[in-house]
Every structure is written in structure tokens, then in C-alpha cells.
Image (cartoon, rainbow, N blue to C red):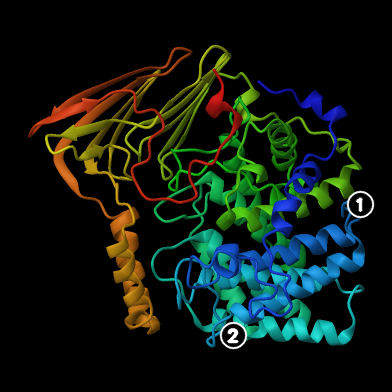
Amino acid sequence: MQSVEKLLSMDNPYKQSIIRNLPRILALFNRDQTSPMYGVGDRYHWAWKLIDFGNGTFQGAAHGFSRMLVSGLLPDYMSEYSAIKRIEEMFLGADRLRRKNGSMEEAFPFESSFCVTALVAYDLLSAVELLDTKIDVETRRNFIAIVQPMVRFLCRAKETHAFISNHLATAAAALFKWQLLTGDSGKNRGKDILQDILSHQSDEGWFLEYEGADPGYQSLCTYYLADIHRMRPDLELLEPLKRSIRFLWNFAHPDGSFGGLYGSRNTRFYYPAGIEYLVAEIPEARVLADFMRISISQQTTVTLDAMDEPNLMPMFNAYCWAATTYKEQSNNTPNNTVTNEKLPALSGEERLVHFPHAGLVIATGFDFYTIISSHKGGVCYHFNDKKNIIDGGVVVIDNKNRYYSTQAFQPDNTVQIDNNMISIVAPLTKMCRTTQTPFRLLMLRLLNVTLMRNEKIGNLVKNTLVRFLITGKKKLPNTIRRTIMIGAQCEIQDEWLNKQGDLTFSSDQGDFVAIHMASQGYWQRQDDSP
């Protein structure tokens, strides 16, 4: 269990992590001015030359460096001149990576990624906003010109393979920031996207991520929505953000971790920026931020240190904003605003909270905290002072060594809650165990450089891939009942209701995953604790 009193002697945990990771971030960028890839941050592309396109996400580091510069957080070895030079190089690299239609890429050539284009546009525009007094008029004009084609792309493109709230929130934030800096409303595309996000927010407070609620990615979505709220308080986002925080704070665990397999995308990272910004307006945000700062300093949650390169820059930028917000609001001491709120995981109250639309049940007591996902076949996270249990559900194997599980997202699972017992009946679905091969990669590349350069066909292929890797469900006629006895011991029993074929239970699977999700499974300290 964590104690908020530890904050009294804590330095800015975000700054510590930023300074630790700065050398590896700086090392990513090409500084050879004779190179056609000067300013590009994807080393696999410009240095190793192992991939045939450049991931544009890295260019967004200009945002974090700008925040560090204007807030006095640069390390001793980096001057203001050097930081501005770095930022100019990142803009130049973005200009060289951007395709003719204004889009950026992350996964393959000619991808026309709505998400990454939005991300880079938002981060570069944030740099322009922050550097207002640090750059001259001509430099600002050049920066805006580099982003303009991305904004045009966002104004006409759509993401069709799924409803992913954090992607849409990034785009909305970029478009509102564009309007703030240029006066161009982009035909109110930002408002349209924002309204779409809000219309999909559940009454329970969560934002849709593929098929349901995912606390990890919701912390990222909250980050972008909080920045829109900062820019445009007239949009009245405070109430949706309050609902978001009141949902999120339930998924900070007693051991300091956050989120997990019970989320629709299996993520357990925590983006702190939006929550830190909202501490002055939302009491629950203050409580959550206080608790998670300790987790970050102790690495009991997934932190910037554990990020791989595809997700490195969004987390770096979030940490930079969190560091400056924490510095401004508290001067490295807890804020003096008094709140009687207590984190649910630390309350010790006996209660049962049910979010039926999210398919999540939270049971708490004096000495335990339990989270159960009914939509994912009884995925169970149980915490007490003696032993934590992470159970990803049932896995069975057939006579051809194919894996099936109850973990696939199924909102129509049968659920019964009776006092201290919850019963879930779920079907078995085939687990995604696909790996990349030279032949598959060759086929994908042929599609990338031919048919998928057509935007409609490209979206069709993306939709097919998402169904194959994430949302598609190949069900067996078999069903399994999982019964969980709620309490300090958290007893779990699994039994067949309808068994057909040669299937056997696989034991001790722990925190396995049943779908493809690249952002799951980042390291935290508990992974290697006894």
C-alpha cells in the first residue's frame, strides 16, 4: 500500500524521469545536415535502414522540448539555443516525412495515418504555442507552413477501422490549437470531432476505445481533452472530464499499478498530464495525481522509462506537461487545497460498484480490492496485503495445439451478482497468435505500394486487419462458467457448461492476452517482485 505522506519529501517525479530518458530521446534524431533525412527521429529508417518509411511520431518531441525550455526544466548540459536548434530540426524532419496528401505514417508506407498525423500536428502546434516569445516571426511562419498540410488532411480524412477516442481527441485538440494560432476554424471540424467523442462517452464516465472502456488509453484521451478545456473553457468540457476522472480513479490499484487486462485494450500505462492539469478543478483528480506520483517515482506503474519507441514521444510529452504543471502548482510540495476525497483503492470501505455498460465490477473491503470484467469472461485483479492475484481468464487447448480463451470482449456474457459472489458465463474464442513472416510482410508491402495508396481501399484493408487481429471473434460452441467468491481470499472456480471436442484446460496462464494489442504489457516493478 502507498502513503500520500511520502509526497512531502518527493522531488518532481516527472522531471526525474524526463532527465533520465533525455539522452536516449536526443540520440534518436539525425543531425547530419548533408543527409536527406536530416532532423528525422526514426533511427530504424535513417540509421539502421531496416524499414522503408519513417515513423512520424518521433517528430512530436518538439512539444516536450518546448515545454522544458519555457519552464526552466532543461538539463545543465543543454542551452536554450541548443534546444531551439533541436526543435527546428524536428520540424524540418516532419516536413521531409510528410506525404503529398499531408499525412504521416507509423506502421507502413503510404499509410495515411489519421492518428499519427493528428499526433504530430498537435505536438508541433503545441511547440509553436509555447515558443511564442522564443522564435521570430519568420520561424513561426515556417513552422505553421509545415503543419498546414497535416491540418488539411485532418479536415477531410476519417478513421474508419474503429472508434478510438484518444485518436479523435488528439485530432480535435490539434484543430482547436490550429484555430487558436491561425484563426482558421477548419470549417469547425474540431467541434464536429469533439461532439462525436462526447456523444460516445458512457454515462459511467468512460470513453470508447475499440469495443469498450480502457483506463490506460482513457488517461491519454483525458490529456488531450484537458488541453482543449484549457484553450476553450467555453466548450464546457469540465463535466465530461469530471465523469472521466471519477471513472478512472477506480482503476488505480493499492500496489500502485493502474489499469490492466480488464480494459478493452489491455493497457496498464498512465498518462499524467491531463490529470495533473485538472487537480485545481476536480478533487478526484488531485487524489489520483497524488497517488500516481508515488507510483511513478517507485516504478510500480508503467512509466516513461518502460516505453518502447512507438509510444515514447506521447508519454515524454505528457510527462513534460505534467512536470511543468506540478512545478507551477505546488513548487515541489503538495497543493494546499483540502479535499476529503479518498482513493477508492485505499478507502477500506465495504462496497460493490458495478459499471454494467463497461462490464466492470469493483469489490472493496477493509483488506482487499478486486476488479472483475464480466465482458472479458471474468478477468480478475485482486489485491490484498498478502498476495495479489492477476487472472486473465480461462485458456483451453485443442488436440492441434490451438489456443482458445474466455478473455475476448463479449458484452453479451451472462452475469449474475449475488452478495459476495459473481458468476459469468462466457464462450470460448480463438486466441490471436499470429506472428509476422517474410511472406506476410511481402504481401503487405505489395498492397501498401499499390492498391492501398487509394484511400478507400487502404481503409478497407485496415478494417479487415483490425477484425482479424482484435475485434473478430471465432467462437466455439463451448461455454464456461466462472464463479468468483468476493472477499479477502478471492476464490475462483471454472467449470464447463457445454463441452464439445477434445479440449483441455491450460493451467497457470496468469496475465495472458487473447488479442493483438501492441501497447499492452509494458514493464512495472511488480513484474519481477517475489
The one nearer the camera, 309 or 8, is 309
**Which label sits in the foreground, 1 or 2?**
1
Horizontal side, residue 251 vs residue 137: left or right: left
Q: Residue at x 40, y 18 (%)?
A: 420
Q: Amino acid at mark 2?
A: Arg
The residue at the point 51 percent across, 73 percent down is 53
Residue 330 spot, x, y in % from top left: 88, 42
Badge 2: few (under 14), some or many (20 or more) residues near its Cα, within 10 Å?
A: some
**Image-quadrant location for residue 234:** bottom right
> In what element is the residue under mark 1?
loop
Vertical order, 127 against 453 (above or below): above
Asked if residue 120 is positioned above or below residue 225 in the image, the reply reads below
The N terminus: image quadrant:
top right
The CA span between labels 1 and 2 is 39 Å
The residue most toward the left is 501
10 Å crowding of disc 1: few (<14), some (14-19), many (20+): few
Residue 184 visible (yes or no):
no
From where the camera sits, is residue 247 visible?
yes
Image quadrant of residue 461?
bottom left
The residue at which mark 1 appears reads as 76
Q: x, y percentage for residue 483?
A: 30, 22
Number of dots carrying numbers: 2
Residue highlighted by disc 2: 152
The residue type indicated by label 1 comes to: Asp
- Classify residue 57 by image quadrant: bottom right
Residue 319 location (% of width, % of height)? 73, 50
Quarter the C terminus occupies: top right
**At numbered mark 2, what does the secondary structure look like: helix, strand or loop?**
helix
Instruction: Please name the residue shown 11% across and 34% down the image.
Output: 399
Tell me which residue sits at (59%, 70%) in the image. Answer: 46
